[in-house]
Every structure is written in structure tokens, then in C-alpha cells.
Image (tube, rainbow, N blue to C red):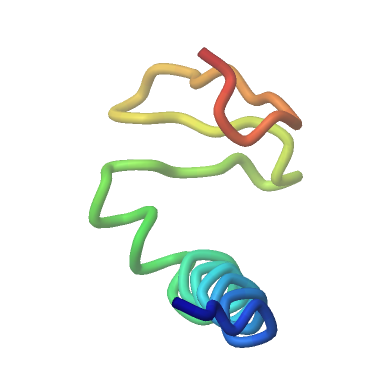
Amino acid sequence: MKINWLAVLLAVVFGMGLGFLFYGHLFQDLWMSGNGITMDAEHTKMFKNGVEMPMSIKPYDF
């Protein structure tokens, strides 16, 4: 069985790019309001239902 690694790489890049656009630039405000998240005026703090959320540069900080 032969795997087309270029197709796999393109699928990963396209999927990550689409998620970045969807949750980042296109529907960020709609996604945040649907999850009860707001930001302060300087965009430095995030709040979920009035409680400040910790922010980290790591995407999955457990």
C-alpha cells in the first residue's frame, strides 16, 4: 500500500488553516459569544461568565 505523503501534508495544513480562519478571524466574536466569553477593551484579559480566564501562549495548557 502506497501513501501519498504530499496529500497527507496538504490535508493537515488545509485543516489547520481552516480552523485558524474559522475560530480566529472569521467567526471569533460569534464563537466567543456562544461560549459566554468576553474580552476587555485592551484585549489582554478574557472572561467567561464574568470570571477571568487564565491566558497562555500554549494552545493546550493543562
Q: Residue at 54%, 77% (x, y): give it.
A: 3
In the displayed structure image, the side of residue 58 where residue 31 appears, left or right: left
Q: Is residue 15 above or below residue 23?
A: below
Compared across the picture, whether 60 is left or right of 5 comes to left
- Asked where in the image residue 61 lies, by quadrant, the reply is top right
Between 12 and 16, the residue placed more toward the observer is: 12
In the rendering, at what x and y percent does residue 38 appear?
45, 44
Looking at the rendered image, the quarter that the N terminus falls into is bottom left
On the picture, is 22 further left or further right than 40?
Answer: left
**Depth check, front residue: 61 or 55:** 61
In percent of width and height, residue 11 lies at 54, 80
Tell which residue pokes out farthest to the top in this image: 62
Work out whether 33 lies above or below 20: above
User: Picture quarter containing residue 57?
Assistant: top right
Which of 9/31 is in front?
9
Q: Does residue 51 show up?
A: yes
Going 38% across and 42% down the picture, which residue do you hit?
37
**Left or right position of 29 against 20:** left
Where is residue 6 shown, x and y percent of the image?
Answer: 69, 84
Query: Can residue 25 be seen in this snapshot?
Result: no
Kindly identify the residue that appears in the image at 52 percent across and 80 percent down.
2
Question: Residue at (62%, 36%) from the top-left corner?
Answer: 59
Exactly how many numbered labels are in the figure?
0
